[in-house]
Image (cartoon, rainbow, N blue to C red):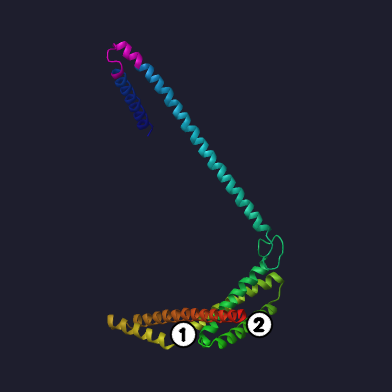
Amino acid sequence: MSCVACASLVADRRAVRDRIRDEMAAALPGAGAAELRAACERRLREHTVLEAQRIRLRHSLAAVEVEGRRAAAARRREREMAAKAARRAAPCAECGLPDAAGLYPPCSYARRTGLLVQEAVDLAVAVRADLDDVEQVAQLTAQCEADTRTLIAEVCRRRGGDEAWVSYAAQEIAERIRDERRAAALRRLASSEEAVAEADAAYEAALRQRPRALQAAEAAAEAACRRAAGFLLRSQLGQLRVVRARAAAGRAHRRAA
């Protein structure tokens, strides 16, 4: 690699000498060989000095650029450290405890538990309520949430522990309830007419392709049934959100009136 670089450097210098010699020959047409050689040497020295100055300038600019990047990186690290320190010093958004990084762990667990309870309630209401009946949706939501929170509190009471442990356990229990209700909702929807029809269609299509592959047809039917149940659940959860949004908008309109 170094030999190639050296050869390139020699070629560049030779090209510079040839160019300067041509320029001097054009500028001094009547000059003798000695005069022309002396003029070329002077111009070559001037070129060398100018080239050295340009190299120093490039190095200086590069050094300034590197230093600027280092300074910018240092400022960025300082800002990140300051932001991290501010986050650590932030009080809990729920209870106001200082130096809680914005959320005291028990409060964080409680917030997560609330979200999980809401998901568990939605899963139950979506498959049990008449989603066209706003009043029934509201009543079933309130009852299901109360029952879910009572169940979580009872299990936590039996387990015992300090505040942080109880908060963590409540989150864990709520997550399990949410998962169990999702599984129950999917099982319920898998027996619906829509899901059964999808399964039957998949079974028949698989047998048409491979008449003797009964196991493959059954697997295709089960997969189609699961997909249909999942689609129905997502659809009913979306409908439930729409029902609640409309009910909330109606309440806001009545208060404004």
Mark 1: secondary structure: helix
| Coordinates of residue 235 in the picture (x, y in percent) | 46, 80
Span colored in magenta: 26-39
SS for dot 2: helix
- Amino acid on which the number 1 mark rests in the picture: Leu
Using the rendered view, name the quadrant where residue 257 is placed: bottom right
Predominant SS of the magenta segment:
helix
Which of the two labelled residues, at mark 2 and mark 1, occupies the earlier sequence position? 2
Percent of width and height locating residue 164 = 69, 69
Q: Which residue is mark 2?
A: 150
Q: Nearer the viewer, residue 29 or 142?
A: 29
Question: Which residue lies at the image location 45% right of the left edge and 29% below the top edge?
Answer: 55
> Magenta stretch containing residue 31, yes or no?
yes
In which quadrant will I find the N terminus? top left
Q: Nearer the viewer, residue 17 or 149?
A: 17
Q: Looking at the image, which residue is at 29% across and 18% down?
A: 25
Q: Which residue is mark 1?
A: 189
The residue positioned 43% from the left and 80% from the top of the image is: 226
How many numbered discs sit on the rendered protein? Answer: 2
Residue at mark 2 to residue at mark 1: CA–CA distance: 27 Å
